[in-house]
Image (cartoon, rainbow, N blue to C red):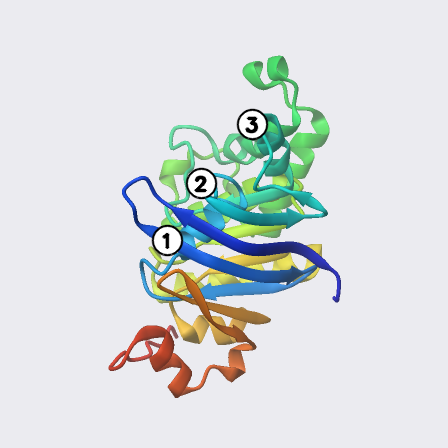
Amino acid sequence: MSESILSVKNLVKTYPNGVQALKGVSFDVKKGEFLVVIGLSGSGKSTLLRCINRLNDPTSGDVLFEGQNIARVDSEGIKKLRTKIAMIFQHFNLIPRHSVLSNVLMGRLGRMTNWKAIFGLFSATDKYNAMKYLELVGISEKAKIRADQLSGGQQQRVAIARALAQDPRVLLADEPVASLDPATCHIVMDYLKKVNQELGITIICNLHFLSLVRQYATRVIALKEGRIVFEGSPDEITDEWFQKIYGEGAREVQVN
């Protein structure tokens, strides 16, 4: 697991209102890692992921993915990039009135010609794989149900299957369990771990709760006010480091 799949170099993001969300962030991501990014709200976690998949354009710096500087690619390059770097979000971003299967198939759109995408002409292989990914996240029996009839945890599992339908090399997860109850948090995180270990997909995940970080991360980066203040294994986050990352008086919350 020595080869880097992604290298972030001196990444800076300043928003039009003058807020500097990232201030020279640099790190490497190894193939097959489950890298977790932690930090307070406003520390730059979401901005970091959104710069990696170009939902946000970096102000300066480089993001090298398989040798290509994706911080500099044009709109056509961004479309190709997103077939290889998938993303799931805190609020699922499903199409509520479409079926579960239809939502998963949306992950194929970036790899289809425009006219096939417009008419939803998915191949038999696309449909087979979509069902396979729904099975992987334990929800294939819900394939024909409308997405808005599912619970939050089930919707996030659909979002994971949709991301897998893109056939990505890297999966970005932006606070994927922040809006879920503790029991459901573990279910969703277990499926992300399964994706990482069984499919070999590299995961970069933003999380709030340190108890989840210790259970699922292979390596951790902590951001504070747009800078990296810690990089290492979950076991190295002592009480002292926790106070440095989250501030004096912060208390660790367990997710059981």
Q: Which mark is residue 21?
A: 1
- What residue is rendered at 54% in x and 34% in y? 101
Q: Residues within 10 Å of mark 2 (few under 14, many from 20)?
A: some
- Under tag 1, what secondary structure? strand
Nearest to the observer: residue 112 or residue 119: 112
Give amino acid for label 1: Ala
Q: Residues within 10 Å of mark 3 (few under 14, many from 20)?
A: few
Which residue position is annotated with label 3? 75
Which residue position is annotated with label 2? 56
Pointers 3 and 1 in contact (CB under 8 A)?
no
The first of marks 3 and 1 along the sequence is: 1
- What residue is rendered at 31% in x and 60% in y? 41
Q: Residues within 10 Å of mark 1 (few under 14, many from 20)?
A: many
The first of marks 1 and 2 along the sequence is: 1
Give amino acid for label 3: Ser
Give amino acid for label 2: Asn
The first of marks 2 and 3 along the sequence is: 2
Residue 156 on image: x %, y %? 45, 48
Left or right position of 168 against 228? right
The vertical placement of 130 against 192, above or below, is above
The vertical placement of 156 against 213, above or below, is above
